[in-house]
Amino acid sequence: MKTHFVCQNCGTNSTKWMGKCPSCETWNSLVEERLDGGGDQKDSISSIRQEFRTDTVSTLQHKAHRLGDLNAGSKPKARIQIGISELDRVLGGGLVSDSFVLLGGDPGIGKSTLLLQMANAVGDRHRVLYVSGEESVDQIRMRATRLGVTPDSQIFLAGETELEAVFHLVREVKPEILVLDSLQTFSSSQIDSPPGSVSQVREIASRLMTLAKSAGISVWLVGHVTKEGSIAGPKVVEHLVDTVLYFEGDEGMSFRLLRSVKNRFGSSRELSVFEMDGEGLKEVKNPSSLFLSERPTPLSGTAVTAIVEGSRPILVELQALVAPSPLAMPRRTSVGLDHNRLSILAAISERHLGISLSQRDLFFYVVGGLKISEPACDLGAIAAIWSSFKDIPLPKSSLFLGEVGLTGEVRKVSQMEMRIEEAAKLGYKKLIVPKTMTDRIPKSLECEVIGVSHLNEFAKRFS
Ligand code: TYD
Ligand code: MG
């Protein structure tokens, strides 16, 4: 029996066991796995290709094609409109009929709920097969009833954990959409390693990919994100699938963010927001309102800025607290903004706004649990730090946009128009922007525009 050792963290192969993976340097992550699986080669990749292949696939195989000829005879890819507009948007305008989608997220975040709601939304027009390796059919049925699944929908439920059994069900039901919940619970009988190991996960993903492309079925795969070494996370199959969606959210908060990190059929970095309540997930059509705290009078230590996620602008509130520190090494704590970025912004503020943070703790928080990484938020973050230090509230309904360099200059941001429009829509009438961009703001918005080219202008203006 031939075996090899596979790192459960990064998937590196090795012929001998090692305590530390040479590639990702994780300790104790190499696990022995059999190379040649037992059993027959039923449902192997080539047999799946043979059995399920459609006419378009078979005519295109084993030949090189001139791009011009292909373009001439092609139709745009068919997309299924799910009917949950936030989900359609993240997918780039609906679900492509032979796509392979990976939905990752922490356990309990709402992945099964989302997919059941998706099945419900398309179930009256398309056949859906929902195979769960985690819950019994009756459990899913109960949840589906609670989520209001209509009686005439064509949703088929099954509880299975073996991949070969899933293929059998696919032959029987002939679904247009296949959901597998979750990647870590399925295993192929042809591979002699436990469910969730790198070999299993890879094998399952590549066979499902072949199924999706040959039979024109849209396959959804749920993957739990775990920190444990023995369970291969969705990262291992990310390169293989067409679309990778991550479902995120903070514990204790009811809203959930659905983010596309890879999409072969649309823009990645697209973001949708849902809210979880007793009746499942609801779409949040105007997410900006969610990330702004409501208060009648302005307070010190907070500033509003606008980020762009995919094709959507979102206003976010940034909060800073500067407080005297008893420690020799004052704390710099940040939630939602990269720690190094915060240190840089603090240093820039010290140098160019003349505030001393050396004996003060600095706490930074992005309201609502969003993570920001765009340089366009720099000016907003510095404004919040400055406002907390001086204990001077920033003007009501003001929005800060601008990248700040180490020299203190305020520089241009991308997609300015989109951010400004969103701000104006939500009643932000005072816009603090890079001076070089003031002429880009349409007069029709009736906003007061303040252009700043350097931080020292900012300090003079608001002191
Ligand atoms: P679930 O979809 O099972 O999570 P996952 O598949 O990602 O592990 O969702 C689990 C959580 O969602 C659970 O804590 C209960 C909550 N929930 C609601 O609050 N309302 C609902 O209508 C449903 C179905 C679940
Ligand atoms: Mg689940």
Image (tube, rainbow, N blue to C red):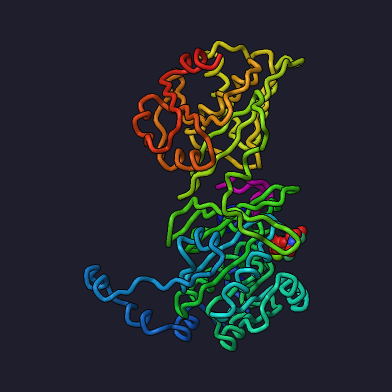
Q: Is residue 135 visible?
A: no
**Residue 228 percent coordinates (x, y):** 71, 53
At horizontal 37% and vertical 84% (from top left) the residue drawn is 55
Q: Position of residue 137 (x, y in %)?
A: 74, 78
Q: Depth check: 434 or 250 in front?
A: 434
Task: Give the vertical position of 452 relative to 230 (above or below).
Answer: above
Q: For residue 187, which quarter of the picture?
A: bottom right
Q: Quadrant of residue 421?
A: top left
Residue 29 magenta-drawn?
A: yes
Q: Nearer the viewer, residue 227 or 13?
A: 227
Residue at 64% x, 64% y is 114
Q: Position of residue 37 (x, y in %)?
A: 60, 75
Q: Which residues are magenta?
A: 17-30
* Residue 457 x/y as whole percent: 46, 15
- Name the chief secondary structure element in magenta: loop
Judge whether 133 appears above or below 264 on screen: below
Q: Is residue 263 left or right of residue 84?
A: left
Q: Observer-nearest residue: 204 or 66?
A: 66
312 vs 188, left or right, is: left
Vertical placement of 356 versus 335: above or below? above
Instruction: From this view, report whether residue 366 is shown above or below residue 29.
Output: above
